[in-house]
Image (tube, rainbow, N blue to C red):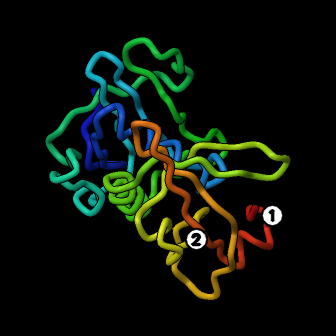
Amino acid sequence: MTEAGIHWDAVAVQQEPGLAALSVLDQETGHRTGPVIWDTRNSTLYFLVPAASAAAAADPALGTRPLSRGTYIGVPGVDRVDPTGLCWIAPPSPTDLDQLVDPLRLAAVLRHLATARWVTRAVAGGREVDILASDEQLAGRACIVCRTTRRPLHPDGVVTLQAGAGVVRDYDTVVCTRDLEAGHGQ
């Protein structure tokens, strides 16, 4: 067991929202989320954030807990990635051991996930992917890819929300200039 609050704090997140948050962070950071421990026995993910910052990322209303000084956390060996018991679901970077999860980005992602809904979006090559979209994204007021509201925003295409009982609703979406230029638009 390692005491939090010395080298890092941790934000404890229940498994389902934790895995969704990790997926979004992984996409947003190009697979450089920072270290995340998964305790499969307790269905909890621990996002390691800079010391004294867990309170900024945790929100009891979202079911997250800040863990700092006086709290001890099981830390797996650096090569323990087998998802049985305690393991790294996002191991520490071997080239940057000081890299931690950005607490403000984690908080923003957790807030986004609390209100987001799964929609289907067409992407390059005619494929369809399921993504989480907020009301702001569905209303065309935020980029469907990165959630920014920074103007200009460009028409992107349609996403489809399966509302249950066979009801389908389409939403016109927008994409920011950065994502459009990066080829992330439809």
Q: Which residue is mark 1?
A: 183
SS for dot 2: loop
Q: Position of residue 94 (x, y in %)?
A: 64, 39
Q: Eyeballing the image, is 59 above or below 120?
A: below
User: For mark 1, does the 10 Å Cα neighbourhood hold few (<14), some (14 to 19), or many (20 or more) residues?
Assistant: few
The residue at the point 25 percent across, 54 percent down is 58
Between 154 and 90, the residue placed more toward the observer is 154
**Can the viewer see residue 98?**
no
* Mark linked to residue 105: none
Residue extending farthest to the front is: 166
- Name the quadrant containing residue 37: top left
Between 180 and 77, the residue placed more toward the observer is 180
Q: Eyeballing the image, is 161 above or below 39?
A: below
Q: Position of residue 119 (x, y in %)?
A: 53, 49
SS for dot 1: loop
Q: Position of residue 159 (x, y in %)?
A: 59, 56
Q: Amino acid at mark 1?
A: Gly
* Mark linked to residue 143: 2
Tell me the quarter of the image containing the N terminus.
Answer: top left
The residue at the point 45 percent across, 45 percent down is 167
Q: Is residue 2 left or right of residue 23?
A: left
Number of on-image labels: 2
The residue at the point 33 percent across, 59 percent down is 111
Q: Amino acid at mark 2?
A: Cys
Between 35 and 3, the residue placed more toward the observer is 35
Q: Eyeballing the image, is 130 above or below 100?
A: above
Q: Is residue 159 left or right of residue 186?
A: left
